[in-house]
Amino acid sequence: GAVVSQHPSRVICKSGTSVKIECRSLDFQATTMFWYRQFPKQSLMLMATSNEGSKATYEQGVEKDKFLINHASLTLSTLTVTSAHPEDSSFYICSAPPPNLITNYGYTFGSGTRLTVV
Amino acid sequence: AQSVTQPDIHITVSEGASLELRCNYSYGATPYLFWYVQSPGQGLQLLLKYFSGDTLVQGIKGFEAEFKRSQSSFNLRKPSVHWSDAAEYFCAVAGIGTAGNKLTFGGGTRVLVKP
């Protein structure tokens, strides 16, 4: 089945610095990647949709300048949290939709990145 | 816009007892529905999904779910719960036809298993 590799799994950074999270599709081409954010004991909230070769689409209320998304190739999408603050501490997960929904593996999720801003 | 509601935030069940997690969705067309499980600090694992056909879907780990269009529901069931089933469960709906087939999650149900 399809695999999405997400790195890093955990990161601690100082307030005011930037952090980049990468998601790579290992055995398929991901033209689209969804980025989710999950606060402790809460659900996954869609932040944005990245599309290879074009600008990302952000959900309402998500700061575009704070959460920079790049999808420069068919196998790599990145999320950069700029000027991070403690309130940005969260669990970030990427997900790639299958080429068509009739496949057996459904949506493919990265393993998540636990970001802690101190 | 699509949405998913999981009415139960927490459910406590005894080991060996049956489990049912409720999920109600809202979507204007035929939904594509999923159930995922997440253990603490971990990513998501797909339990099962429904696209079309038989409305009773079998998944991994002994789980099944039934799609009921008239009730806009996709409830998850397991006949006999094991201690390892303690986790967070998420129901999700795919917005077919929207840009990129966006997946929307319900709020989740935390399952606690008593010995």
Image (cartoon, coloured by chain):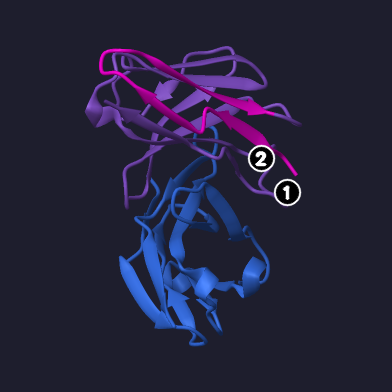
Chain colours: A purple, B blue
Please state the chain letter of the residue tagged with numbered disc 1 in the rendered image. Answer: A
Q: Residue A7 magenta-drawn?
A: yes
Q: Are marks 1 and 2 in contact (CB under 8 Å)?
A: yes
Residue A65, image x, y percentages: 31, 13
The stretch in magenta equals A1-25
Asked if residue A74 lies left or right of residue A112, the reply is right
- Give the main secondary structure of the magenta stretch: strand
Residue B49, by quadrant, is bottom right
Residue A14 is situated, as x and y percent measured from the top left of the image, at 30, 18
State the residue at coordinates (67%, 22%). Answer: A75
Query: Residue at coordinates 34% horizontally, 55% vertically from top-left?
Result: B107
Answer above or below: position of B102 versus B74.
above
Residue at image position (45%, 72%) is B70
**Residue tagged 1:** A103
Name the secondary structure under disc 2.
Answer: loop
The amino acid marked with disc number 1 is Thr
Label drawn at residue A98: 2
Instruction: Identify the residue at the far bottom of this view.
Output: B17
